[in-house]
Image (cartoon, rainbow, N blue to C red):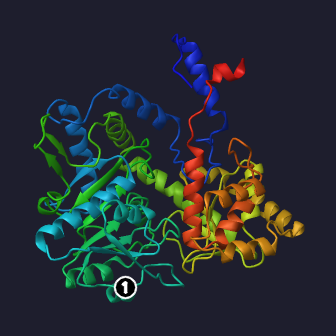
Amino acid sequence: MRMPAQGRTKEDVFAALEEFGTDDLDVHGGGTFAYIYDAGPDVDDVAKRAYTRYLTENALDPTVYPSLLRFENELVAMAIDHLQGDEEVVGNFTSGGTESCMLAVKTARDYFREKKPEITEPEIILPVTAHAAFQKAAQYLCLKPVLVPMDPVTYKADPKAIEDAITPNTIQIVASAVSYAHGVIDPIEEIAAIAKKHDLLFHVDGCIGGFMLPYWRRLGEDVPPFSFEVDGVTSMSMDLHKYAYCPKGASVILQRNKDLRRHQIFTCSSWTGYTVINPTILSTKTGGPMAAAWAVMNFLGDEGYLSIADKMLQATKKIRAGIAAMPEYEILGDPELCLVAFTSDVMSIFPVIDEMKKRGWFIQPQLGFFGSKENIHLSIDQASLTQADAMLKDLRECTDIVKAKNEEAVPADIKEFVKALTPDDFTPELFQEFMKMLGSTDSGELPDGTTEINELLNVMDPGVAKKALTEYMNELYVPPQKSHSAAAE
């Protein structure tokens, strides 16, 4: 595929953009229970106008665009106040939760390089419920992730398991408020005490829960201390592009003080070009996301967010009650925010997801792992309130359809074969055979239904699943050989 020889008209370009998006998830209406955070058209308008106003400004050098430095410092100040930080807490604006989490880990690594240079193989302790971003950080930064079990009843991090995992090489402990998978708050105060006792850094991942938890507390929910009010918490991450309803590309990393944050910063003057100083991972970055985040937070204000939180709380209570009333399902743990995972002992949950998709609902599967049974995951939004009754009605009907069919999506012998595979057995050729069996087209497109895929992934050894998913992603991003216009001729 080549660049077009002649430029296309604006009308043609924008028509193509609209055509590209015809199969995308609907970002409005409350029918999507993952990825989407919908605060309504007024917030969208404010965000888009602010984003495009600062689209071309570059946050690479804060002395060139002081407006962007002001946006960043004011956003961080609001985040610090929201998470009960004192005047010592500092932070930076990042592109998302993964970058924030990676910076927390990078800070720990470099802090201990200076403090304890004898540690040559640093370890970070991660409950199995910690976000995958921390394992990504460990891989990128050459650290050893030490996974520890969760409490099998509450699905929260187990403080004893964490303390038992501490070695002379440990540099950091991670906990969640809330965990994505089950929506529960880890025992932050207990873990913070352990971290302080052993002189370790302790990061609380509040990417998905940190913003809304203070509002739920104000609405009467029992929210334990989880942020900088807890002695021993040394850093926090909090996304603004989730339940603060800012456009994508907006998160913050907060450090207990400048002495820690110093280890977050990258500086290079030992080359022939301009001096590079990066407080975050990205160097060049548009001012759009931070301008939009600043605009949305100032537009909604504290009372606006409290109103949104109330709608989220109502929607969550209604949906939880509806699921609990269905005897086929069990909610995993006791969610403390709007993230709800539920499973079934009487049928596979994967066909239910496909049946719901046929009716316009997007709900997310989570595979079984480390004592957490495969489940349906809902990220409930304030827009979910008006759709809760309809969603529960369809869930009831789709459940009945799946039960009545009583079909085995994948034959037992194939499941047993897949279950017995080891990572050494898995090859690209075997992957291609699986793809054909699952109905993949020559272009690599998968069938609309994902039941069979999820059934197989759910029984695979994690090492095999990792290789299979890596192979799939490697096949997915393949440049087209023809332009769209040439293909149509």
Residue in the picture at 52% in, 12% down? 5
Residue in the picture at 61% in, 20% down? 15
Q: Which residue is mark 1?
A: 159
Task: State the image coordinates of residue 284 (x, y, percent, origin top left).
Answer: 28, 36
Split into 4 quadrants, where in the image is the C terminus? top right
Foreground pick, 271 / 84: 271
* SS of the residue under disc 1: helix
Q: Is residue 20 left or right of residue 114?
A: right
Kindly tell me whether residue 468 is visible in this rendering. yes
Q: Quadrant of residue 247?
A: top left
Q: Is residue 5 above or below residue 210?
A: above
Split into 4 quadrants, where in the image is the N terminus? top right
Foreground pick, 113 / 193: 113
Q: Is residue 106 left or right of residue 223?
A: left
Q: Quadrant of residue 412?
A: bottom right
Task: State the image coordinates of residue 8 (x, y, percent, origin top left).
Answer: 54, 12
Q: Is residue 118 above or below residue 104?
A: below
Foreground pick, 439 / 175: 439
Q: Is residue 150 above or below residue 380?
A: below
Task: State the image coordinates of residue 414 (x, y, percent, origin top left).
Answer: 77, 71
Task: State the image coordinates of residue 364 (x, y, percent, origin top left).
Answer: 62, 59
Foreground pick, 482 / 314: 482
